[in-house]
Image (cartoon, rainbow, N blue to C red):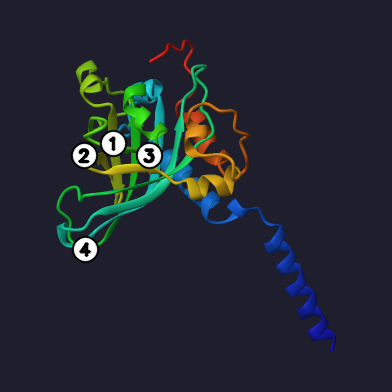
């Protein structure tokens, strides 16, 4: 009898915890944490990470952990992540949840998971996302990003490619072209985290959005590896 009573109490406590737990406490918070971990690990790659100069110039950064590439070189790509936009004051705003999908990039055999980082270098390259979707290569020029923590980023590269892309797979990190991939806003996740009245456009366009524990790790990682510039100019 005593044993059954304890089991009943434990069941009730778990039920109350599940009901009271915020909607974002599972999938979305895990996605944000994984994105923060990917950015941290990539930026800590000795001498071979994303150039610090590029991170200083970034107007927005997206991270997609565990993006899946299709099989036998014919499949597409699909992943979920977050993107944050730098405000005119140089500070990182609340991130929006995104999805990415599209044609296959490079030949591959079998199904492989890849971490992807997108660095937006101009407001023109980013503005498509404000409307809910941007096709890399068509709406915004995209190219494999240069690597090397202290590497200089050529001006012509920035002018031709509004988005620079990177991937990490099986311990290897390099720039990669994502020509044809489509980045879209995941408003289902955004509403779960921020509330039903907020959209990705609201979040990324600069509307005051209260930061919460679900997305805080990603923003903290951005603040560490792409801090507020001493002088911020309108791009």
Disc ID at residue 165:
1
Mark 3–mark 4 CB contact (< 8 Å): no
Tell me, yes or no, if residue 28 can be seen here: yes
Mark 2–mark 1 CB contact (< 8 Å): yes
- What element does badge 2 sit on? loop
Calculate the distance from the C-alpha at mark 3 to the C-alpha at mark 4. Answer: 24 Å
In the rendered structure, which disc, 1 or 3, sits on the residue that comes first in sequence?
Answer: 3
Query: Hey, which residue is sitting farthest bottom in the picture?
Result: 1
Calculate the distance from the C-alpha at mark 3 to the C-alpha at mark 2. Answer: 17 Å
Calculate the distance from the C-alpha at mark 1 to the C-alpha at mark 3. Answer: 13 Å
Tell me, yes or no, if residue 44 can be seen here: no
Residue where numbered disc 3 is placed: 42
- What element does badge 4 sit on? loop
- What element does badge 1 sit on? strand
* Vertical order, 196 against 227 (above or below): below
Mark 1–mark 4 CB contact (< 8 Å): no
In the rendered structure, which disc, 3 or 2, sits on the residue that comes first in sequence?
Answer: 3
Residue 187, image x, y percentages: 48, 45
Q: Does 22 sit left or right of 116 as displayed?
A: right
In the rendered structure, which disc, 2 or 4, sits on the residue that comes first in sequence?
Answer: 4
Query: Who's the residue at 80% across and 75% down the image?
Result: 9
Calculate the distance from the C-alpha at mark 2 to the C-alpha at mark 1. Answer: 6 Å
Residue 44 lies in what quarter of the image?
top left
**Viewer-nearest of labels 1 and 3?**
1
Q: Residues within 10 Å of mark 4 (few under 14, many from 20)?
A: few
Mark 3–mark 2 CB contact (< 8 Å): no
Query: Who's the residue at 28% across and 36% down the image?
Result: 165
């Amino acid at each position: 009898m005593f044993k059954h009573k304890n089991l009943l109490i434990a069941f009730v406590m778990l039920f109350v915890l599940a009901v009271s737990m915020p909607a974002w406490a599972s999938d979305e918070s895990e996605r944000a944490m994984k994105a923060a971990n990917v950015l941290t690990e990539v930026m800590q790659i000795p001498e071979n990470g994303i150039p610090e100069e590029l991170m200083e110039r970034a107007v927005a950064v997206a991270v997609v952990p565990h993006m899946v590439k299709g099989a036998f070189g014919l499949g597409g790509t699909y992943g979920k992540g977050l993107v944050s936009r730098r405000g005119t004051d140089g500070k990182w705003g609340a991130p929006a949840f995104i999805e990415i999908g599209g044609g296959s990039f490079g030949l591959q055999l079998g199904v492989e998971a890849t971490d992807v980082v997108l660095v937006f270098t101009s407001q023109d390259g980013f503005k498509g996302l404000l409307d809910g979707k941007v096709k890399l290569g068509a709406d915004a020029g995209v190219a494999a990003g240069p690597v090397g923590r202290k590497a200089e980023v050529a001006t012509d590269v920035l002018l031709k490619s509004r988005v620079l892309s990177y991937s990490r797979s099986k311990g290897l990190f390099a720039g990669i072209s994502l020509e044809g991939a489509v980045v879209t806003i995941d408003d289902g996740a955004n509403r779960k985290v921020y509330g039903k009245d907020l959209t990705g456009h609201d979040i990324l366009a600069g509307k005051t959005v209260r930061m919460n524990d679900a997305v805080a790790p990603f923003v903290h990682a951005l603040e560490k590896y792409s801090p507020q510039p001493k002088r911020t100019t309108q791009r």
